[in-house]
């Protein structure tokens, strides 16, 4: 397994600036954010673009790959996390088309994975959203298959704000849906497994790895602290609003030794990609970098590597 990081928390640095710093700090891989520049900032990563995929040529893609390779950095994935089942037809069309552009760009550059969300209409039930996914996603899956790219669906329900209540903005957050998703969409589609979202849903993390190990195409390393007072006051039916705190590894409740060991047992040899959303290490690039290094040190201690 290799250590990587998601570029999103450093939006004002260029890809090569991030790569230079990451390489100096012994990271090996980057998941590169590829939102359209025109995307509004209504979501945490919206508008963060470290590679512009619009009309990316083969020569441009090769240049980017070469620049990273010269720094001993690879791309584990291209990341774009919109609502691919957005209830507004025009918005859905826009994000679906950009998802396909990201996939094609990954194919051009030889990046093996695109990480994203299935999406959901928060006003619909899980089954209604899955029925809609069966209409929308086959075309996206075909683009990925034709591009020799895997799609890694992150397992976040996206149910952290009032506009996402009650069903969230990503239907693929539970084993029941994953089984159906893998059956319908075939081996092109797998998981970008983030254990923090299993923890608060009370889904057994190690059991998920054992059952779905062959379909884990990418991981997000992020911890979760449960605010017990917030949980007491709001209750679990609040969908997590007011009682969850994303943290750096080691500052939450996930057993990282068990997580890494179980991944190893099922043969996963991909990236452990740090997704930094710890609010205590935000505000400046120096604080964000400090957070990445805290996470790196926690996870690196579990891997056969020397910093």
Image (spheres, rainbow, N blue to C red):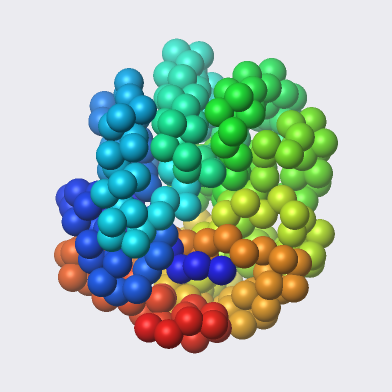
Q: Position of residue 2 (x, y in %)?
A: 50, 67
Quarter of the image holding residue 132?
Answer: top right
In percent of the image, x 57 and y 64: which residue is there?
196
In the image, residue 145 sits, relative to residue 12, either above or below, namely above
Q: Position of residue 116 (x, y in %)?
A: 52, 40
Closer to the camera, 302 or 195? 302
Q: Position of residue 275 (x, y in %)?
A: 43, 61
In percent of the image, x 36 and y 59: which residue is there?
73
The quadrant the N terminus occupies is: bottom right
- The answer, for residue 13, to whether it is visible in the render is yes
In percent of the image, x 29 and y 42: which residue is there?
64
In the image, residue 94 sits, relative to residue 301, either above or below, namely above
Closer to the camera, 199 or 190? 190
- The answer, for residue 136, to whether it is visible in the render is no
Q: Is residue 187 left or right of residue 112?
A: right
Closer to the camera, 247 or 80? 80
Q: Is residue 40 left or right of residue 264?
A: left
Q: Position of residue 288 (x, y in %)?
A: 26, 67
In the image, residue 30 sits, relative to residue 98, either above or below, namely below
Q: Is residue 124 left or right of residue 88?
A: right
Quarter of the image holding residue 209?
Answer: bottom right
Closer to the camera, 222 or 203? 222
């Amino acid at each position: 397994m290799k250590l990587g990081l998601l570029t999103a928390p450093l939006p004002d640095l260029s890809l090569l600036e991030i790569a230079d710093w990451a390489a100096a700090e012994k990271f090996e891989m980057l998941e590169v954010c590829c939102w359209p520049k025109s995307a509004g900032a209504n979501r945490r990563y919206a508008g963060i673009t470290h590679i512009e995929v619009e009309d990316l040529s083969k020569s441009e893609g090769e240049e980017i790959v070469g620049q990273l390779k010269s720094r001993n950095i690879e791309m584990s994935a291209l990341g774009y996390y919109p609502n691919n089942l957005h209830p507004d037809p025009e918005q859905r069309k826009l994000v679906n088309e950009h998802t396909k552009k990201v996939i094609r760009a990954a194919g051009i550059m030889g990046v093996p994975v695109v990480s994203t969300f299935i999406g959901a209409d928060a006003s619909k039930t899980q089954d209604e959203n899955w029925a809609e996914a069966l209409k929308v996603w086959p075309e996206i899956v075909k683009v990925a298959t034709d591009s020799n790219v895997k799609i890694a669906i992150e397992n976040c329900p996206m149910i952290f704000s009032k506009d996402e209540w009650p069903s969230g903005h990503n239907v693929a957050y539970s084993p029941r849906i994953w089984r159906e998703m893998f059956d319908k969409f075939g081996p092109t589609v797998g998981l970008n497994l983030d254990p923090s979202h299993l923890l608060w849903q009370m889904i057994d993390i190690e059991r998920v790895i054992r059952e779905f190990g062959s379909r884990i195409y990418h991981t997000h390393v992020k911890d979760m602290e449960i605010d017990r007072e917030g949980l007491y006051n709001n209750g679990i039916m609040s969908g997590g609003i007011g009682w969850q705190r994303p943290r750096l590894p080691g500052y939450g409740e996930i057993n990282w030794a068990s997580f890494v060991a179980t991944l190893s047992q099922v043969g996963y040899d991909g990236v452990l990609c740090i997704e930094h959303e710890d609010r205590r290490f935000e505000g400046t690039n120096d604080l964000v970098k400090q957070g990445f290094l805290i996470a790196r040190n926690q996870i690196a201690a579990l891997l056969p590597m020397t910093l």
